[in-house]
Amino acid sequence: MKIGIVTYWKSSCNYGEQLQNYALQEYLKDMGHEPFLIRYDYDSDRIKLPRHKKIGKLLDPKQAPGYLKAVRCGRKLAKESIIHPRGFEAFRQRHLSMSRIYSSADDLAADPPAADMYITGSDQVWNSFEGGLEQMRNRLRVFFLDFGGEDVMRASYAASWGRNDIPDEEKVFIKPLIDRFDAVSVRERTGIGICKGLGRDDAVVALDPVMLFDAGKYRELYRGSSVDHSGEKYLFFYYMNNDGDYNRKAVFDLAESMGLKVIYVTDDWHDGLPRSFPDVYEWLNMLDNAEYVVTNSYHCSLLSIVFEKRFGVIRRFGKYAGMNTRMDSLFDLCGIEPRYIDDDDFEVLMRPPQKPDAGRIGNVLKPDQVIGAA
């Protein structure tokens, strides 16, 4: 079958986003299908706030600092991506089959790509935390497959809500869209309850695409990368998009006390700590060869399990706190003890790696089973 996939893909600094794209296409190709990424430009399709609401945020002492900071951060990140390119577009061009770029939900609805099936997922395609329904309406239309003819099958694969519940207005908006799906699978067990609240009692849990392969697949992917870290002793620190007050310097202090250097990869430039800007291949090399891993990233945690690393997870907080459900579900799915770091207590890093419970993993659906149910 020809299978069009909508998911997050545009990031210039989110490694897990690129690898989940890669893994799902690789698995579907191995099944004999023809998968391709539908390159929907979700950033340009964000609905802008009305002028009076922007002014209201600027005048509100509680909202103004966060609003202004978000604007500044977006501009700085775009500039930094030019100064320190991480080769993501080159990775996509090399490893992904892709459609033309669709500028909007309307563009996609007017000229949908030919396919036998559309899949939404994986990643947090059903999370509207960046602006709620008011600003994310068009994005949600696409990520709930509101395009194409009725003859095309529709399914979600390991789609993440990234939260425990959704507002009533979103339920009203989403229900007629998810009703059209031939099969529904989510990444976290908490997502089952949300789906049931929308009338999808048939929703099941599916493996994140990155978990579809063992360590050998990713070692083969990064083999021959320009920089090899296998002879070094270091702590790998990967910290993503959270403007909270976690003391990242504590990670550097810990490594120094252990006689290790830190390789720090992030999209956050506020702390003034020395950072690295690897491409996807070197990032995998860094992770695989680290003595210890500290992260707040779902996919970095998942790959730490795949590579059997000693790792610890920094919890999300603020507007990102709901994303902790992903980690809870990951630990439960793998049947391993939670590996959270509390403040600057790094005891969890001293625990030996735990292999996933094969029985639990074996009971979670894979793409062939989800497609077969459609």
Image (cartoon, rainbow, N blue to C red):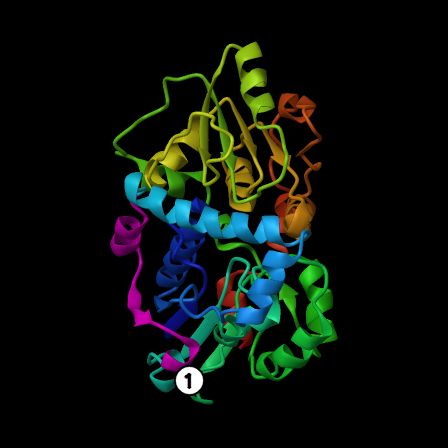
Viewer-closest of 127 and 123: 127
User: Is residue 329 something one can see in this rendering?
Assistant: no
Viewer-closest of 48 and 344: 48
**Residue 292: x %, y % from top left:** 53, 24
Above or below, comparing residue 2 to residue 271 in the picture: below
Look at the image and tell me in which quarter the N terminus lies. bottom left
- Tell me the crowding category of disc 1: few under 14, some 14 to 19, or many 20 or more residues within 10 angstroms, Cα based: some
User: Is residue 279 something one can see in this rendering?
Assistant: yes
Above or below, comparing residue 101 to residue 297 in the picture: below
Task: Please tell me in which quadrant of the rendered image residue 217 appears.
Answer: top left
Above or below, comparing residue 144 to residue 237 in the picture: below
Viewer-closest of 195 and 57: 57
**Residue 329: x %, y % from top left:** 67, 50
Task: Please tell me in which quadrant of the rendered image residue 351 appears.
Answer: top right
- The number of numbered badges drawn on the structure is 1
Above or below, comparing residue 193 to residue 300 in the picture: below
Q: Amino acid at mark 1?
A: Gly
Instruction: Indicate the secondary structure of the residue bearing disc 1.
Output: loop
Determine which residue is flagged by label 1: 148
Highlighted range, magenta? 87-107
Decide if residue 336 is on the left or right side of residue 99.
right
The residue shown at (39%, 72%) is: 3
The residue shown at (43%, 68%) is: 6
Q: Is residue 3 magenta?
A: no
The residue shown at (25%, 31%) is: 226
